[in-house]
């Protein structure tokens, strides 16, 4: 067995520039996966977490027995 990479020799793969490139690709992949998962999740509205005073106390619908 010859100690080589699949396409490039081992001496090239051990350079610092290749390690920096590999780290960049890894971080880029993690960011891409995070954004893709966030895009699939339902949208979160902050206004749903807090009750505000601008809600009506009674309905103004044509159906007065409808829920508020």
Image (cartoon, rainbow, N blue to C red):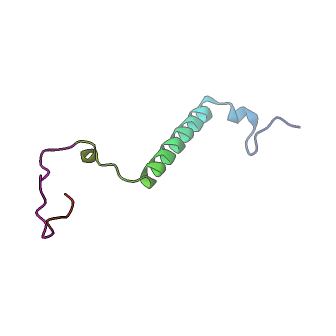
15 displayed left or right of 65: right
Q: Quadrant of the N terminus?
A: top right
Q: Which residues are magenta?
A: 51-63
Q: Residue at x 75, y 34 (%)?
A: 10
Q: Residue at x 73, y 32 (%)?
A: 11
Please name whichever residue, 55 or 57, is drawn nearer the observer in this view of the structure: 57
Please name whichever residue, 13 or 50, is drawn nearer the observer in this view of the structure: 50
Q: Quadrant of residue 60?
A: bottom left
Magenta stretch prevailing secondary structure: loop
Please name whichever residue, 37 or 30, is drawn nearer the observer in this view of the structure: 37
Q: Residue at x 23, y 42 (%)?
A: 50
Residue that protrudes farthest toward the bottom in the picture: 62
Above-or-below relation of 8 to 15: below
67 displayed left or right of 9: left
Q: How many numbered circles are shown?
A: 0
Q: Residue at x 12, y 70 (%)?
A: 62
56 displayed left or right of 31: left
Residue 19: x and y in percent read 61, 32
Residue that protrudes farthest toward the right in the picture: 1
Above-or-below relation of 43 to 30: below
Residue that protrudes farthest toward the front in the picture: 65
Residue 37: x and y in percent read 48, 50
Q: Quadrant of the C terminus?
A: bottom left
Residue 42: x and y in percent read 39, 54
Please name whichever residue, 47 or 53, is drawn nearer the observer in this view of the structure: 53
Residue 15: x and y in percent read 65, 30
């Amino acid at each position: 067995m010859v100690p080589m990479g699949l396409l490039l020799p081992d001496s090239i793969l051990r350079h610092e520039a290749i390690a920096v490139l590999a780290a960049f690709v890894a971080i880029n992949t993690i960011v891409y996966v995070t954004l893709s998962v966030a895009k699939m999740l339902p949208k979160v509205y902050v206004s749903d977490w807090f009750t505000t005073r601008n809600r009506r106390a009674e309905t103004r619908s044509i159906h007065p027995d409808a829920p508020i």
